Amino acid sequence: MKIAVLSSGSKGNSSFIESNDQAVLIDAGLSTKRLLMKMDEVGADHKIIAGIIVTHDHSDHIKGVGTLARKLKIPVYIHEENYRMKADIFTNCQIKFIEKEFTIGNFTISPIPVSHDGTVNYSYNIQAEGKKISHLTDLGKATSLVRERTKDCDLFVLESNHDPVMLKEGPYPWYLKQRISGIKGHLSNSDASDLIISGQRTNLKNIILAHLSEENNDPVLAYENMVCSITEKDLDINVHIALQNKPLEFIEI
Ligand SMILES: [Zn+2]
Ligand SMILES: [Zn+2]
């Protein structure tokens, strides 16, 4: 199994996960043209995508889903309430409602309910070839359910949205600062490293830090925060950064 994060952040998110000549996309929060360009850039073949899985109904995750699904003639896997909130973008799309574990070809996909302020909010475990990717963005709190469900993953895509000091001292209005740092907001750099070092992490070999804020974070800070934490715990894990404007090349597990 391998993953390329095509784009990550508040201006658009999408991850391409491939196993045995079949692929799934998690979210499509960019235009079809830009997504196809990013796939080309990393050598991801859009013809093998078997479905788009939606995490929640915020536009940075959902706005390109309908157009891409129609163009590639592939189904959209989405919770019914998220679909109802954005029904107009899904005209003529094949929709599959999800609530619990489901399969797409070789992939077994398990939704993990997370605390965030979309209508319904899911992170996902994606399993294939005996490996497991935990894909977690857009959550304000790493609950005990999240910790339990992700403890044995081989690769983590993990939100590391903001540095708390940069957020506090930054330009955002007070209400937005409250929203981002609240339990229905986004994980900070230290929330992300706490989640990693609180578990055993026997299988975990790669962490992709994702959904970094361009205003309230710095990729170097996010990277150093995670590397310091795992080094202190003597964990041998590669740390990668997913960015908004440059796709992250495939990582194979
Ligand atoms: Zn988002
Ligand atoms: Zn969101």
Image (cartoon, grey):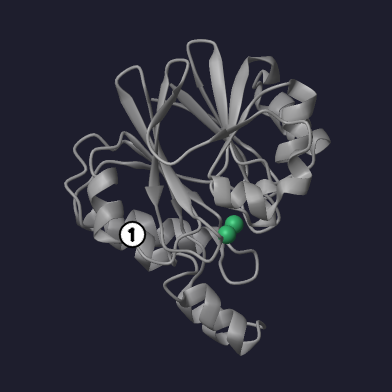
**Residue type marked 1:** Ser
Residue 23 at least partly seen? yes
Q: Is residue 233 above or below residue 153?
A: below
Q: Position of residue 104 (x, y in %)?
A: 48, 21
Considering depth in this image, is 58 or 186 the residue closer to the camera? Answer: 58
Q: Residue at x 60, y 85 (%)?
A: 175
Q: Return the residue at label 1.
A: 193
Give the quarter of the figure containing the C terminus. Answer: top left
Classify 178 as above or below 47.
Answer: below
Where residue 37 sits in the image (x, y, percent)? 78, 31
- Indicate which quadrant contains ligand 2: bottom right
In this view, 38 is above or below 106: below
Please name whichever residue, 51 or 214, is drawn nearer the observer in this view of the structure: 51
- Where residue 77 sits, quadrant-wise, is top right
Res 9 quadrant in image:
bottom right
SS at badge 1? helix
- Figure quadrant of residue 59: bottom right
Q: Quadrant of the N terminus?
A: top left
On the rendered structure, is 225 left or right of 15?
left
Residue 174: x percent and y percent?
A: 60, 88
Quick check: can you spot residue 136? no
Position of 121 compared to 190: left or right?
right
Q: Residue at 29%, 57% (x, y): give it.
A: 195
